[in-house]
Image (spheres, rainbow, N blue to C red):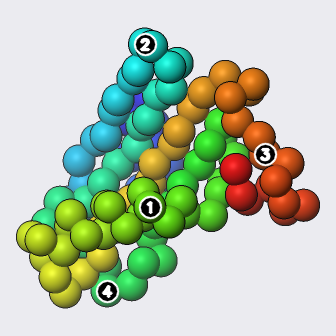
Amino acid sequence: VTRGWLQAAAAVLGDAVVADVKPLEMTSASTGWTVSGIVSTALGGRRARDMQLFFVNRRPVDPPKRIAKLINDTYHQYNSRMYPVVIVSFCAAQGLVDVNVTPDKRTV
């Protein structure tokens, strides 16, 4: 799954953006959630947060504030001048996620 994110990101954003990224893959058997994507290493990154993309059940969503803060704060321990390239997809059963919180369906 992560390889697909890497190929898609390279095709859309360019090879330079994904040059220093690592795969992210987690699964919880007890809750049914899976998390996959890519996150840049301390050698990579960008000067702005413009390459931080989050998805829930394949829908683009606004970055969850706590998760984005956790990722950025952790990254800044190693590279305080940049922001990480982040593409993260959260997947769960449809019954666990409410996409109808706002009309644009970007808040879950």
Q: Residue at x 32, y 61 (%)?
A: 70
Mark 3 sits on what residue? 99
Q: Disc 4 and disc 1: Cα gap in Å?
A: 20 Å
- Please name whichever residue, 21 or 16, is drawn nearer the observer in this view of the structure: 21
* Residue at the farthest right position: 103
Q: Position of residue 37 (x, y in %)?
A: 40, 43
- Give amino acid for label 1: Arg
Mark 4 sits on what residue? 47
Relative placement, left or right, of 105 versus 58 is: right
- Give amino acid for label 2: Ala
Q: Nearer the viewer, mark 1 or mark 2?
A: 1
Identify the image quadrant of residue 19.
Answer: bottom left
- Give amino acid for label 4: Arg
Q: Which mark is residue 66?
A: 1
Q: Which mark is residue 29?
A: 2
Image position of 49 with respect to 96: above or below = below
Q: Nearer the viewer, mark 2 or mark 4?
A: 2
First of labels 4, 1 by sequence position: 4
Q: Nearer the viewer, mark 1 or mark 3?
A: 1
Q: Is there any visible trace of residue 44 in the rendered image?
A: no
Identify the image quadrant of residue 95.
Answer: top right
Q: Secondary structure at mark 2?
A: loop
Bin the neighbour count of mark 2 within 10 Å (Cα to Cα): few under 14, some 14-19, many 20 and up: few
Q: Disc 3 and disc 4: Cα gap in Å?
A: 31 Å
